[in-house]
Image: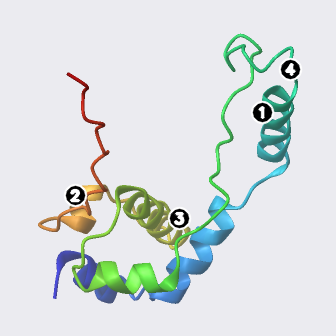
Amino acid sequence: MGTFQTFLSSKGITAKQIATTSSRIEAFDDTSRALMGKRWKKRTNKETATKKYAELEIGKPAQHGRGISEKQVIAASKDVAVARKARSKILKAVNAIITKKGEAAVDMKALFEGTKARAGKKPVVADKKK
């Protein structure tokens, strides 16, 4: 049993609670939807397509729109390598649950100490012509 699993069992948190909380936290709100609409209009408009988002003062949405799944939480509790973004979503959800109970928030090392993050695929480099 890894650090994450022992933490969950000691606090009485289930994978379903984490998945539900994560989907609530990561869901788009009105401001994020408005920013996404502005970014889409910028890309589709021929006049603004070449400009950068910073020039037009369009920021990134705060939420990602998709929470962590219960299956990913179960995999993380079994010490399977989980992607960096998935780990951060789990951390956000766990901290939201813990602070609601009146306890102090935890950091990434406390949850995932000793487990490795899943590495992504390496980019394919085209061969140089001689």
| Disc number lying in front (2 or 4) | 4
Name the kind of residue labelled 3 in the image.
Answer: Ala
Marks 1 & 4, CB-CB < 8 Å contact? no
Name the residue carrying label 3.
Answer: 96
Q: Is residue 43 above or below residue 112?
A: above
Q: Position of residue 24 (x, y in %)?
A: 68, 68
Residue at the spot x=59%, y=68% of the render? Answer: 67
Distance from Cα at disc 1 to Cα at disc 2:
35 Å
**Helix, strand or loop status at disc 3:** helix
- Quarter location, residue 72: bottom left
Residue at the spot x=30%, y=55% of the render? Answer: 121
- In this image, 6 relative to 71: left or right? left
Name the kind of residue labelled 4 in the image.
Answer: Lys
Name the residue carrying label 1.
Answer: 39
Q: Residues within 10 Å of mark 1 (few under 14, many from 20)?
A: some
- In this image, 57 relative to 64: left or right? right
Name the kind of residue labelled 1 in the image.
Answer: Arg
Label 1 vs 2, first from the N-terminus: 1
In this view, the residue in front, 121 or 118, is 121
Q: Position of residue 110 (x, y in %)?
A: 23, 63
**Helix, strand or loop status at disc 4:** loop
What's the mark number on residue 109? 2
Name the residue carrying label 4.
Answer: 46
Distance from Cα at disc 2 to Cα at disc 3:
17 Å
Label 2 vs 3, first from the N-terminus: 3
Distance from Cα at disc 3 to Cα at disc 4:
42 Å
In this view, the residue in front, 108 or 39, is 39
Distance from Cα at disc 2 to Cα at disc 4:
46 Å
The quarter of the image holding the C terminus is: top left
| Disc number lying in front (2 or 3) | 2
| Disc number lying in front (1 or 4) | 4
